[in-house]
Amino acid sequence: MLNCTITLIVLYDLFLGEIFAERLFDREVQSSYSLTVAATDNGGRMGYTTVLINITDVNDVSPVFLHTEYKVTVPMNAGKGRPLIQIKARDPDLGESGRVTYNIYDASLIISGSLFTIDPSSGILSVKADLSDKGKYIVGC
Ligand SMILES: [Ca+2]
Ligand SMILES: [Ca+2]
């Protein structure tokens, strides 16, 4: 647990405790904090309470592939629909902000895009068409 600095503001004769953040939070680093806050009276007697702080998420992280490059060798007679490799990326954001979908991205690879397909959910790259008379392909995702 990280140390947090809190500031207590006293208004009039009442102790009105307000807690301020002294830096930005990053939910991916730490998603919650637990603070013990003390209140002291004029006689020096103290009471304590615990403040639990949950950090909500924002979509501040892009998906990151597990590998920077994937290589697969395919027999030229590989049948249509044959799975070749599973591409994986992770995104630590919560919910939809962390849900990763895959597609063949580079529009300049039109031929490769017509020969291969990638499942948007699983990231499995498959043969889409007959490769028998084709050469070497590079697919960007
Ligand atoms: Ca994200
Ligand atoms: Ca986030």
Image (tube, rainbow, N blue to C red):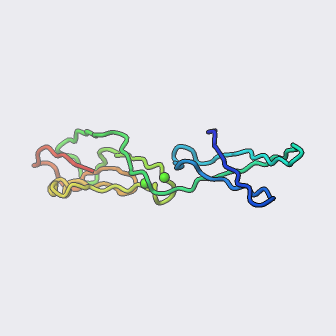
Relative to residue 19, is residue 141 drawn left or right? left
Q: Considering depth in this image, is 139 or 90 the residue closer to the camera?
A: 90
Residue at (24% x, 51% y) in the render: 127
Return the x and y of residue 10 as percentages of the image width and height. 74, 55
Nearer to us in this view, 53 or 87: 53
For image coordinates 30% across by 54% down, the residue present is 118
The image quarter containing residue 70 is top left
Q: Seen from this angle, which residue lies furthest front?
A: 12
Position of residue 3 measured from the top left corner of the image (x, y, whole percent): 63, 39
Inspect this view and state whether residue 27 appears: no
Between residue 22 and residue 133, name the one nearer to us.
22
- For the N terminus, give its image quadrant: top right
* Residue at x 41%, y 54% (from the top left corner): 100
Q: Can residue 19 be seen in this view?
A: yes
> What is the tally of numbered marks visible in this picture?
0
Name the side, left or right, on which 21 lies relative to 84.
right
Give the side of residue 95 with respect to residue 127, left or right: right
Q: Is residue 92 left or right of residue 108?
A: right
Residue 106 screen position, x and y as percent = 21, 54
Q: Quadrant of residue 16?
A: bottom right
Q: Give the percent coordinates (x, y) of residue 35.
A: 70, 45
